[in-house]
Image (cartoon, helix red, strand yellow):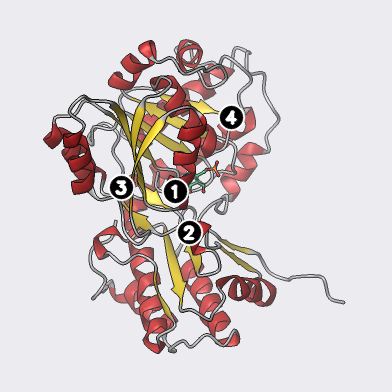
Amino acid sequence: MNTRSPGRHFLQIPGPTDVPGRVLRAISEPTVDHRGPGFADLGRAVLTGLRRVFGAEGPVIVFPASGTGAWEAALVNTLSPGDAVLMARTGWFATLWHDMAVRLGLQPVLLDTDWRRGADAAAIEAALRADTGHRIRAVCVVHNETSTGCVTGIPAIRAALDAAGHPALLFVDTISSLASIDYRHDAWGVDVTVAGSQKGLMLPPGLSFNAVGARALAAAREARLPRSYWDWKPMLEANAGFYFPYTPATNLLRGLQEALALLEEEGLPNVFARHRRHGAAARAAVRVWGEAGAVELQCAAPSDYSSSLTAVRLAQGHSADALRALILEKFNMSLGNGLGRLKDRVFRIGHLGDFNDLSLMAALSGVEMGLKLAGVPCASGGVAAAMSVLTTGADAGDGAGA
Ligand SMILES: Cc1ncc(COP(=O)(O)O)c(C=O)c1O
C-alpha cells in the first residue's frame, strides 16, 4: 500500500496556520536561560513589538498557553464572583467563552445571533440601557468568530457602550483576527484584548495574550475571582524589566520576535489588505459554486465578511465532514470542520497568516475538485472567478468585508 503523500500538506484550517521558515528556524535555535543577562533583549523586543500589533500603548501580557488561557485571564483578573457579563453568542467560540464564564461563577447575560452575522450593536446598547443598576461589569465580544467567518465591528460595540453611558469593561477576542484583520486596541476603546499565537501571528500554538488598558488594570485591583497562574500583577512586575515571573516559552518567544519582524517588514496595512483580497477571492469562488444551489457562504451579512477565513455551508443531504475527508485523502489538504450546531453542515477554508495568491488558488482548486468528486452540485468556474478577483482586483458583488 502506498502510504506516502508526495508534496506538501496544505494546512487550510483557520489556525493553526503555516509557520514560515524564518520563524521555524528561530524557534529551533538553542534554548536560552530565561533569567540570564541576555534574555531581557528578547523580552524587550517582543513586549514592545507586540504593542504595535495590538495598537496598544499599554502592556501586552504573554502567557505560555493556548487562547483559552487568555480568555480565562481576562475574566479572572477583572471580575468578582456573581458579576454579570454581557456576552454576544455569535458562534462556537463565543459559546465556549460563555461556558467558561459560567464555570468561573460569573452570571452571563446572553445575546444570541443566528451564527450568520457578527454581534448586534443595537441589542448590546439596549441591554446596557436596561441595566440601570450597572450590574453588568463587562461586555465580551469575539471580533472574528472562527466557527462562522463573521466579524463584529468593534467601533460599533464601543459606540453602543458609550451611547448607553454604561461603565462596563469591553473585552474582545481577536484570536483569529490579530495580525490579519485591522484591529486597534486603544483607538477602539477596548479594555482587554485576547489573542493567540497560532493564527495571524504565524507561530505554532502555545502563546496567548492579554492587551490590558488602564480601566482593566484598575478593575484588577478590586477583582475577587481567584487567580494565580493567570495573575497579571506578578507578570507586569517582572515584565517591567523584560523578564517573566515563571518559565516563559522561550523558544516560542524567539519565534515571536521573528514573526513580529516579518509583520513589520510587510507593514500591517499591507498585511490587512492582503487578507482582504484573499477573502474577496475566496467568496467569489463560493458564489460561483453556489449557482448550482448546494453551496453558500455561512456569513449572511456582507458587512461582516471575514477576511481570514471563509465558512462554506452545504445544503441538507450533503456531508461537510465526508467532503473534508475526501479532500484530505485525495489532495492532502486539511480544511476546518463545522463546530457545534454547524457540525457536518459547514467546512471552513483558512486563508490567513503566511499565505499568498498561489496558496489560495491551490486551496480553492482542492475544494472545487473535492466538491465535484463528492457529488455535491457545484457550478464550474469558482477557481476562475477567484483568479479574476486576484488579477483584476475586482470584487463586484462582494459587499464590504473586514
Ligand atoms: C475566536 C477564537 N477564540 C478562542 C479560541 C480558543 O483558542 P485555543 O484553541 O487556542 O485555546 C479559538 C480557537 O480557534 C478561536 O478561534
Mark linked to residue 53? none
Quadrant location of the N terminus in the rendered image:
bottom right
Q: Residues within 10 Å of mark 1 (few under 14, many from 20)?
A: many
Q: Residues within 10 Å of mark 2 (few under 14, many from 20)?
A: many
In this figure, which residue is indicated by the disc labeled 1? 176
In this figure, which residue is indicated by the disc labeled 4? 64
Residue 274 visible (yes or no): no
For marks 1 and 3, give the CA distance: 12 Å
Q: Which amino acid, mark 4?
A: Pro
Residue 108, image x and y in percent? 38, 36
* Relative to 61, residue 148 above or below: below
Residue 312, image x and y in percent? 44, 70
For marks 3 and 2, give the CA distance: 17 Å
* Relative to 16, residue 355 above or below: below
Q: At 51% across and 22% down in the image, what residue appears?
A: 43
| Secondary structure at numbered mark 3 | loop
Observer-nearest of 101 and 322: 101
- Pointer 4 and pointer 3: residues touching (CB < 8 Å)? no
For marks 4 and 3, give the CA distance: 25 Å
In this figure, which residue is indicated by the disc labeled 3? 182
Residue 140, image x and y in percent? 35, 37
For marks 1 and 4, give the CA distance: 18 Å
